[in-house]
Amino acid sequence: MSDKNIHSGHRARLREEFRIKGFKDWSEHKVLEYVLQRVLPRVDTNGIAHMMINKCEGFENVFSAPKEQLEDVIGVGKETAEYIHMLGELIRYYNNLHLNKSKFELNSETCEDYMLKLFSGEEHEIVYIICLDAANHILLREVIFEGGFETVEVDIARIMRIAIKSNAAYIVLAHNHPSGISIPSNADIVTTQTIERALHLGGIKLLDHIVVAGRKCTSMRSGGYLTSRAGIVNAAAYKKKTPK
């Protein structure tokens, strides 16, 4: 049997399997193999999928990797790299719409997934304020700064205006560490505590400040850096995920 017939039969089996149950129970490289088949119609994409995941150090990183990095993989040209990059942008676009849906409740069960999606593919440090009502439903999410989380750079007066204007009962702060280290810095701690005190004077509670790095979230409340008691998270919710 020719290689062409072997590949054709394999692709047909994958298409039928996808038609029946989607990507359920598929391995990561098998999903990427199937995706690559859409843009590489006459190539065995199994090996390319493995190489791409290894090159990007993980399946999820494939869709946030620079196009130049993807093109370094043998068998991946400019068109394929642009296709994968476009899918990554599509994923981030969908996540942004999903995370903005009304009446989303941010709690210890939803917080980690929410934060990982929020910062997916973000290569620069960015700071969010998330305003919640008394039932932890999200009222507003807004970028308040791009860059390091330093006391002299974060506009505390602006945070207060946003919180009061949204009629928030609670606030959650979140920012990422592109370095991959989720441990809060001294600047993170000092600034967060300053913001917590300012919000308290306005009758608004800072529930938590989440630091995101890669696929890991660290709760500053769980780390003991916030002074008030009640929060939305617990330490168990932020164990590092182990890739399958």
Image: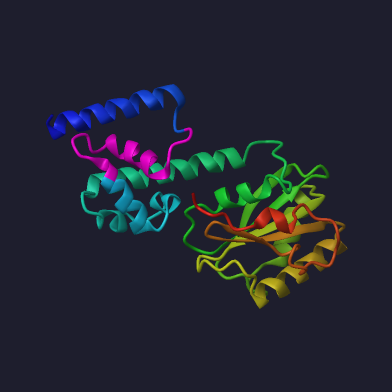
Q: Is residue 217 magenta?
A: no
Question: Residue 31, located in which quarter of the rendered image?
Answer: top left
- Quick check: can you spot residue 184? yes
Q: Which residue sits at x=62%, y=70%?
A: 183
Residue 57: image x %, image y %? 40, 58
Q: Is 88 on the left or on the right of 208, as rendered?
A: left
202 to 185, vertically: above or below: above
Give whichever of 28, 3 is nearer the camera: 3
Q: Quadrant of the N terminus?
A: top left
Give whichever of 2, 157 is nearer the camera: 2
- Quick check: can you spot residue 129? no
Extreme-front residue of the structure: 1
Residue 169: image x %, image y %? 82, 50
| Residues in magenta, as a range | 24-46
Q: Which residue sits at x=12%, y=31%?
A: 2
Question: Residue 71, located in which quarter of the rendered image?
Answer: bottom left
Extreme-left residue of the structure: 2
Residue 17: image x %, image y %? 38, 26
Residue 192: image x %, image y %? 73, 68
Q: Is residue 44 magenta?
A: yes
Q: Which residue sits at x=55%, y=66%?
A: 177
